[in-house]
Amino acid sequence: MFTGIIEEIGTVKAVRHGARSVVLEIGAEKILEDIHLGDSIAVNGVCLTASALGSHSFSADVMPETISRSSLSGLSAGSHVNLERAMASDGRFGGHIVSGHIDGTGTIVSVRKDDNALWYDISAGSKIMRYIVEKGSVTIDGISLTVAKVSADVFSVSAIPHTVAVTILSEKSRGSIVNIENDIIGKYVEKLLLPQKTEQSDSKITKDFLAEYGF
């Protein structure tokens, strides 16, 4: 599990392509201080497993499913990426619950300045937009951000200078593709309240049950 607080910007050193998979070698410093083989690292919000370690880099395998759902296929040598280690049990929960299992991608349709903040308007499909809630949490390229505005197919986030400076948001512009992970709590609540019609659910949690107990 991650929190969406980026620890370091890494640099892709090499991309080795398989038939449908990819091996990424990423240069880093801070996150390598206590990383071991098999540990999880979020790369632009995608949970990857460290499969090889160097003195100043790590490598990770990216399977076809991940490539098809994320923007990692667009990385090349020299690309910058947001990096975060899995949350330590004694760490501070600075962002929100982030699984590293992204739901898809969105496209930045505009970037605009508002005094000391930058607004990013992001277009996304209906499967993502249904879980976007104003003043709720969303993960953009691994960054925990607050949704500021929502319309039918576009949502907006506002980032402070520090967040822009320590992440790859500073490199994003109109047309950039970003990884999106919706708030996992919303997805689980929907699943419990609206089970698939083809499934036989014995859950006693219903809208009436929640209302009766003050939810």
Image (spheres, rainbow, N blue to C red):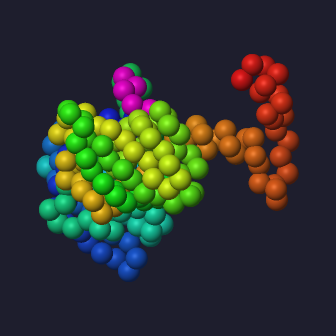
Residue shown at 47%/33% (left/top)?
135
Q: With 172 as the anchor, is 62 left or right in this view?
A: right
**Residue 101 in view of the camera:** no
Q: In this view, does 96 lie to the left or right of 32?
A: right
Residue 155 visible in the picture = yes
- Magenta stretch in the rendered image: 92-96
> Which of the pair 8/153 is nearer the observer?
153
Expressed as whole percent of the image width and height from the top left, the position of residue 11 reads: 17, 55
Q: Where is residue 75 in the image (x, y as percent from the top left)?
A: 26, 65
Main secondary structure of the magenta stretch: loop
Q: Residue furthest bottom?
A: 19
Q: Which of 75 and 153 is in front in this view?
A: 153
Is residue 114 toward the left or the right of residue 4 in the image? left
Position of 2 with respect to 34 (left or right) is right
The image shows residue 124 at horizontal and vertical percentages of 46, 58
Q: Does the magenta stretch include residue 175?
A: no
